[in-house]
Image (spheres, rainbow, N blue to C red):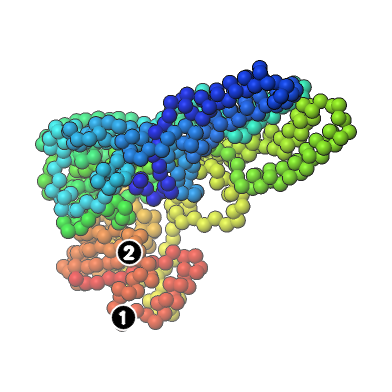
Amino acid sequence: LVESKSLQEASLYKELPTRLHAYGLPFALIYLAWAYVHVTAYETYIGSRENNTLILGLLATLHLLSFLVCKWSVKARTALTCLSATTPQHATHIRLIPRPGLGKGVFCPVQHGPSPSQKGAEREITFLLHQKKYIWDQDKKTFRKLQQPGDRPIPMSHLHSFKGLLTSAAISQTQAEYGPNRFEIPFPTFRELFEEHAVAPFFVFQLFCVALWCLDEYWYYSIFTLVMLIVFESTVVMQRIKTLTEFRTLSLKPFPIRTYRAGTWVEVSSEDLLPGDICSVVRSKGEMAIPCDMILLDGGCIANEAMLSGESTPQSKESVRLRPSTDLFDMADGADRIHVLFGGTKVLQVTPSPEAPLKAPDNGCIVMVVRTGFGTAQGKLVRTMVYNTEHVSANNTEALMFILFLLIFAIAAASYVWIEGNRRHGDRRRGKLMLDCVMILTSVVPPELPMELSLAVNTSLVALAKHAIFCTEPFRIPFAGKVDVCCFDKTGTLTGEDLVVEGIAGLEIEGPFALSMAHQTPKETILVLATAHALVQKTTKGEKVVVVGDPMEKASLDAIGWEVGLGGKVSPRKDSSSTLMKQWKGPSGVRILRRFPFSSALKRMSTLGHLESGGKGGQWWVGVKGAPETLKSMYRPESIPVTYDAVYKHYGRHGSRVLALGWKWM
């Protein structure tokens, strides 16, 4: 019924009026029946005041439970308050059950409205799930997620010739379909959140225990416990409100941006950007950031993506104009991320293309908007954070098993008290005896247990927050206590960036495992290290030129004594005292004409360069580096040393970061 890999079950329902809910009119009839029996046949069916109180108490408990179970379970809610619907046209709600481990079930209202794309067509049927819009597809008979341009592959030929939204009708239709470009995070009031916490199973159980203690004349203890419960739940609610307030700060402040609409450049608010818009991106100023996900059509950029990925190294972005028209652009493919400016990231430098068919009035790079709002990479992150922090507790299977184990002894004790009380004290009031038995059963769960379970998680969250660490799934914190070993693979975020080039192995100069200094290796090895990288120059606010890129590539370039210049040129450092410069007998420099960035799928990167002079000057050169096991199949068989595998495995097992190098003259 719903196109989603995370859903296990989906079903349609029509909600009944409140009076027809299972906790409405049916219980009213039951109460009337009880009143009739109480008046007309008291002695026959009830017999005593204690039985009368017991019957009324059971009815009230069942009535309350029938209402609360609708809050605890969406399956119970649909069974007690709804009728099953056969078609979306007659449905008012949809019940969605996720796959195990992906959250709890939800009950979403189905909205019926005019279709923004087809005038006079049948009404559009939609629902929102965690701020994701799903639309009924009459042809496929299923709800599908609202597709933005970036959610599906796009032919490069389309991107090369795209001219933006050219008509007012296209702009209006797109506005109606996708809405504004902002994060509309629902912000409940304190009262709404407290009501949600007040109907939680543990809290209701605690209130039930307090009521029992009051019946047994434990007034002071009961009132103190009740106040403690309310104060604790209030602090949890305030913590949730504080968290939601922090989420709101993730929304970018709107700012004007140059946009190409209807064949002319206009200035619109970043909140009004639409998928399909063509915009001009300039260097970010102050708190300004990229307002949505965009494809770089012309020009080049350097972007800081630390907000999304935590990667402190600025990333170089390239235009799709460099790609063949026969290719497909797919944002799901990691290799195509080099063409994407993600929402929430900052542009450190722009290089407009002089050959771009469309020129921006502010001399910025030309981009195309492909995802807006919660559809962006930042929007998905915000959505994950908002909807994974609704209920913070350590209630788990272990706690349930512990309670069930204690319940066995409680049942045995309550049975003994009931039997012995009736045998030895037949004249004792059965009401008091029954109250004692119920209190024995409820004492299995100490009133402090739910608070302690929740407090353990909340204390952990506060401790993590002090270190600027946000936990998207707090319920996993108790499991973290069982962890013995942690393995991280995020160089530059969780580890230091100070990398050192130990040397070049496998040259057979002094033995297969011997390390040679980088600057003492053959000319071809030095040229590969000098060209196979993604380092670029960036101008800082003080107009100072710095080189940005992977720290490993910086270390490699420093080890051979080369530097990055303007226009993609690399050359030996102009330092007369440098022994590296004196020993170098190769070309005076190499101009990098095309980079093929590192791809996790290919496990390699390469560059195409042109040698300016010396050696085989005037020739084309290709340098490549990557995983040794990947490049082995690309080398000429006669060029592979017999110790190739042994060398890279030896250093890899000793914790080194090992890369294989390759080259070719064109």
x, y (%) of residue 317?
27, 50
Mark 1 residue crowding within 10 angstroms, few (<14) / some (14–19) / many (20+): few
Camera-side residue of 215 and 422: 422
Mark 2 residue crowding within 10 angstroms, few (<14) / some (14–19) / many (20+): few
State the residue at coordinates (34%, 53%).
Answer: 549
Q: What mark, if any, has residue 637 been given in the picture?
A: 1
- Picture layout, residue 229 above or below residue 293: above
Residue under circle 2?
602
Camera-side residue of 339 and 382: 382
Q: Is residue 317 left or right of residue 93?
A: left
Camera-side residue of 661 and 400: 400
Q: Is residue 147 left or right of residue 440?
A: left
x, y (%) of residue 500?
44, 60
Q: Quadrant of the C terminus?
A: bottom left
- Picture layout, residue 640 above or below residue 88: below
* Camera sees residue 578: no
x, y (%) of residue 189?
47, 24
**Disc 1/disc 2 C-alpha distance (Å):** 20 Å
- Picture layout, residue 511 above or below residue 333: below
